Image (cartoon, rainbow, N blue to C red):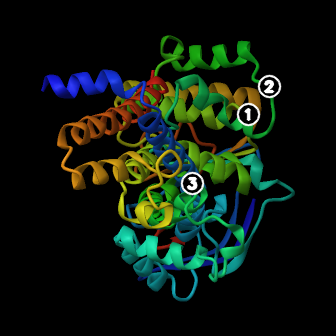
Amino acid sequence: MTGIFDWFRECFTDPAILSAIKVTFQMAVCSCAISSVLGITFGLLLERFNFPGKRIVIRINRTLMGMPPVVAGLITYMVLMRRGPLGALGWLFTIKGMVLAQTLIITPIMTGMVHQYAASKAPAIREFCKTMGADRFQTYVTIIKEMRHDIYFCMVTAFGRSISEVGSVMLVGGNIKGSTRTMTTAISLLKSQGIFTEGIALGMILLIMAFIIQWLCDFLQKGDEH
Amino acid sequence: MIIKGLEKTVGDFKLYIDELYLEPGKIHGLVGHNGAGKSILLKLMMGIMEPDAGSIDYEGLDIKEVTLMPQTPYLLHTSVYENIVFPLKLRGIQPDETEIDRLLEMAGLSEQKNQYALSLSSGEKQKLSFLRAVVFKPKLILMDETLSNLDPESEAAIIEMIKNTQADQKATWVIVSHQLENKKGLCDEIHHMSKGAMMD
């Protein structure tokens, strides 16, 4: 146990670990932000409009919500590799590539959750906005504002999924020390080297990060109720 | 407002209003049993539902000057004050704080001004819904069973507010209810509905 705390103290002076924390945070925040924009938009559009094949689209999205990360990683890898359709971007083994893979994993989750919440709440809000004389844009803004607690929850879930992911970031990022190594890929490497104590300590830092984000969201939610 | 040949089918229920004229500036009561089609008629008037056939002539009134108070009001997840000023903000109107305070005083909600709206009692929620509906001075106010299921004190308070507001604003009101008691003294005209049609 003492070993963990000693390592805990030292880890904030180790550039490799600090880099892993930074990369994890960068990747999670960027992918979560992009997925939130896409997921909220798709989720609300899916609730609002009826079109032929809508049920199939919803089912496909639900299937993608459970897509194995390693599959998303493999697809992203194939798209980004030198001879792939987006190979010219040079994003393979970079944080940008990892963000793309994470966005592929998280966006269906955000879309599905937002659509589910919107299906139960948006019709009443839309009707209310009509009675108040709101135009289409004002109605959308009001729906998003009124669903903010649900959206916070979706974002926390997406963020949690992003920071805990290992399969796709390993494939797309390559686990390069000081460049694309995240906390989860570092833990995976430490485990393969038999260094369990440091792996547990990194895991604790990961949990603390998730806890802080969760606490921040709860704080913001409670703040606007009083 | 002139309604002519209005038709709407919802499931097995069919609404047909041959002709209905609502004289401007009057308080109209729309009375009928549950399932008579009163709420559907109000939703058609509000533009929430599209009619299958027929027309509603607002006589030059913009739909943004029409409002509807449902039996169970939707309250925004914010304070009482923010709920009241919501329709003003939509129209880019700066709230007149003296007027807001006067309305809150009239409804007996002054102390709850900064309270979270969803924490109000059901009677207070109806009063808040009322203030929010009248604050932007609409020309046509539709009330769907707003006075039903209220305690006598809250019902009397809202009736009093309708009278006070009407003295100020001279709007047209359509007050829907399944019971006629207490509405006779309030309404200038009473219209009866049954099985999706007007009885008058």
Image point (63%, 64%), residue name: A91
Image point (40%, 43%), residue name: B148
Image point (39%, 24%), residue name: B153
Q: Is residue A130 above or below residue B164?
A: below
* The C terminus of chain B: image quadrant: bottom right
* Residue labelled with disc 2: B94
Badge 1 sits on which subunit?
B
Callout 3 amino acid:
Ile
Callout 1 amino acid:
Leu
Position of residue A120 in the picture relative to residue B92 (left or right)? left
Q: Is residue B62 above or below residue B96?
A: below
Residue A113 in the image: state x and y as whole percent: 42, 60
Badge 2 sits on which subunit?
B
Residue B177 in the image: state x and y as whole percent: 46, 50
Q: Is residue B125 above or below residue B175?
A: above
Under circle 2, the secondary element is: loop
Q: Nearer the viewer, residue B82 or B51?
A: B82
Closer to the chain start, of discs 1 and 2, is 1
Residue most toward the bottom? A52
* The N terminus of chain B: image quadrant: bottom right
Contact, mark 1 vs mark 3 (Cβ under 8 Å): no
Q: Nearer the viewer, residue A33 or B136?
A: A33
Q: Specify the label residue B88 is tagged with.
A: 1
Residue A120 in the image: state x and y as whole percent: 42, 59
Residue B90 in the image: state x and y as whole percent: 74, 40
Callout 2 amino acid:
Gln
* Residue labelled with disc 3: A95
Eye-nearest disc, 1 or 3 = 3
